[in-house]
Image: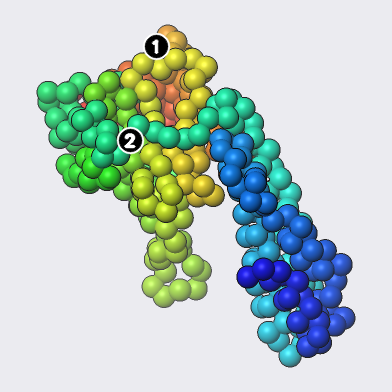
Amino acid sequence: MKNEPSRIVFALAGMGVLTGLCATPTVVAFAALTLLSAPSPAKAQEVGCSASARLLRFACAADLRDDFFTATARCIDNNNPSATCIDDAEDELDDGREECGEVFAARLDLCEALDDATHEPPFGLAFAADFVDPTEIGVSVAPNPYFPLVAGNRWTYEDAEETIVVEVLAETKLIDGITCVTVNDIVTEDDDVIEDTDDWYAQDTDGNVWYCGEISKNYEVFDGDLPEEPELVDLEGSWKHAQEGAKAGLLLPFVPTPGDVIRQEVKYTDAEDVIEILSVTATESAPGGSCAGNCLQTADFTPLEPDALEHKFYAPGVGMIVEVKPDTGERLELMEFVGVGQ
């Protein structure tokens, strides 16, 4: 609805709702900012990575508008509304503005690294002939050495708090004409399941592994509940190629080239993981595997979390053996690899 924020502000002001409590400079200024920041039709017709990033910046402002006015509505749904509640909503708004700016800057940096290319992956029904039958991987089809998608392969990882078990299942899913294999990923903390994810991957005839989507079930334990057990709280991070604008990406190439920057997935605001190939001659070790001078090393990041960076190390024939956060030194290590036929 055109001029919706202004109508809300002035309607509430006329009703006396904003008087004294909510008619703060932040409320009025934010409503005006929302109106002035709407993209023009000309901007909307531009194409390319950076054009998308600019439009997503507007979307971020719109989301902030919704969150702020919803939070304010909760505050005034009270006979004695608290000024502190409004202050908290304004603080969250300020934090959100800063975060929107940081994400926008990170997206522009990524666009520069990608030469402002649009994301148009050769994936879908028109490209089905370029993909292998995943049930033949490890049988008549050689697996990608850095992620061998052979049914029955299982990896167990641990860090200071969590245990993660990843297993290639004997299950497939047809997504936009391409048959993908299901890989289950279970995260536990203090023996409680906090995440149970089915990822879908496909391998093309060149040996590259593609990310087709995922359904991620996130759980949380709440103190005081009886029984106190993990409860499904959201499906955050879930996406599937060709649904709601989501697009598949290249998870890991068969022949990695240092310097390449690769989108692994695209569902804007939900899933925007990217890798940069750092080396194919790295050295690392973990209890469950090691490599000396032949490790694939990647830098994993996402514009959605500009400060988050991970380095991952892959041993040929095994897969990922170490994930480390360079800023803290925190490590996720492979404890055991159970490989079919090994």
Q: Is residue 92 above or below residue 287?
A: below
Q: Is residue 58 above or below residue 123?
A: below
What crowding class fits label 1: few (fewer than 14 Cα within 10 Å), some (14-19), or many (20 or more)? Answer: some
Quadrant containing the C terminus in the rendered view: top left
Q: In this image, 139 relative to 314: left or right?
A: left
Q: Which residue is mark 2?
A: 123
Corner quadrant of residue 30 = bottom right
Assign a secondary structure to mark 2. Answer: loop
Q: Position of residue 6 (x, y in %)?
A: 75, 71
Front-most of residues 156 and 29: 29
Please name the amino acid that badge 2 sits on: Phe
Residue at (36% x, 37% y) in the render: 211
Let me know if residue 190 appears in the view. Answer: no
Q: In this image, 9 relative to 324: left or right?
A: right
Assign a secondary structure to mark 1. Answer: strand
Q: In this image, 76 relative to 66: left or right?
A: right
- Alpha-carbon distance for marks 1 and 2? 30 Å
Front-most of residues 169 and 27: 27
Give the mark nearest the N terminus, 1 or 2: 2
Q: Which residue is mark 1?
A: 294
